[in-house]
Amino acid sequence: MSKRAKKKTAIGIISVGVIVLLSASSLWGMTAKKVIENMEQACKKQTKDIEDMTIFNKLAGGMAMLAGESITYQKRARIDGKTIYKIRNETKIMGKTMVTIYDGIYNWSIDPASGEVKKKKAEFTPDPTRLWRNLKPSETHYLGTEEIEGGKAHLLKIDNPFKVVGKPSTKALQEGESSAEGKIWVNAGNWTLMRTLMVISGKSKEGKETIIKINMELKDYRSVNGMLFPYRMTTTTEIDMPGLSEEEKQMMQSFMGVMGSYEIITTDVKVNNGLSDDLFDGTKLKPGKSMFQIPMPQS
């Protein structure tokens, strides 16, 4: 081999080595903190021109069969020096409109049983498209990348998913007798949330070991005024009780197959309509009738 050929070969080997090292450095350098920061930066860049949003949804499957259409209102605000989006959700259930409000500090709602207005300090932002607000780098761990439906994703493990996606209102477990672990998948290309998984372990009121898996997937992202928004959100809940007989397990799986999954389908999104601040004022909610006092709609 001539000196010139050897030189070219050496240069080629060095070039390949540099590329491999750069790729490895990029992979090794990724951390949970960087994923969270990239999610935040992407979201802020996309929403910089969006002052408010009105989101029209329809619900399908599971318990959503009892509900009709829903409307979610969001409006940009400054709370304690931070820019957030206040949220108001209106959902029709058995002919009655149920309202919940997140004002940046408190969650407001009307209790369906008593009809009374409830106010509770918000522990996290109740908006999956801005989940990064609830993530703390010290309580989040980078596990690498995975190929899932929708593309390549960064996988993060969450120490306490209750602080991130909230504690489900399930009565299957005894209060205070459960523990949980969680994971989230973030799109490696555009930093949108693709999937969350929460696994809760504990004991039922009857003392039986119970495992609950709650999986949420965000799909069909579309550009709305420059912001990527998921037009489909599917939630699936599975309950496993190892102590049950095979017949009991089959009955439970059959029930959860019908009632354990539901989907929120967005039909339209409108932006910058000049929404009134009154929509997000929880003090303006008025007590209503108990759901048990509302006549069932006639077929």
Image: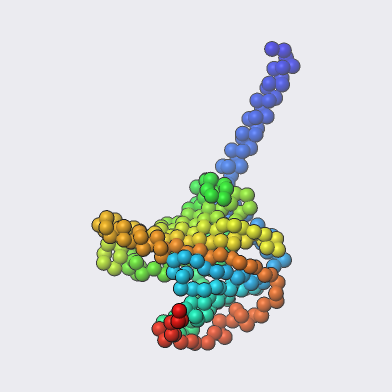
**Which residue is the extreme one toward the right?**
4
The reply to whether residue 188 is visible in this rendering is yes
Q: Quadrant of the N terminus?
A: top right
Q: Nearer the viewer, residue 183 or 73?
A: 73
**Identity of the residue drawn at 45% across and 81% down:** 298
Between 229 and 33, the one lying in front of the other is 229
Indicate how the structure is coloured in the image: rainbow
Figure disc tally: 0
Of residues 173 and 143, the one drawn nearer to the viewer in this rendering = 173
Quarter of the view holding residue 211: bottom left
- The answer to whether residue 161 of the structure is visible from this angle is no
Q: Left of 225 or right of it: where is 136?
A: left
* Place of residue 126 in the rendered image (x, y in percent of width and height, measured from the top left): 53, 68
Q: Identify the residue shown where x is 54% and y is 84%.
A: 285
Q: Position of residue 116 (x, y in %)?
A: 46, 85
- Residue in the image at 64% along x and 80% along y: 277
Outermost top residue: 1
**Image quadrant assignment for residue 247:** bottom left
Image quadrant occupied by the C terminus: bottom left
| Observer-nearest of 33 and 68 | 68
Q: Residue 106 location in percent, x, y? A: 53, 76
Q: Residue at x 64, y 72 (%)?
A: 54
Q: Farthest residue toward the front?
A: 299
- Work out whether 298 lies above or below 148: below
Above or below, comparing residue 8 to residue 295 in the picture: above
Q: Left of 14 or right of it: where is 283? A: left
Image x and y of residue 148, in percent: 52, 48
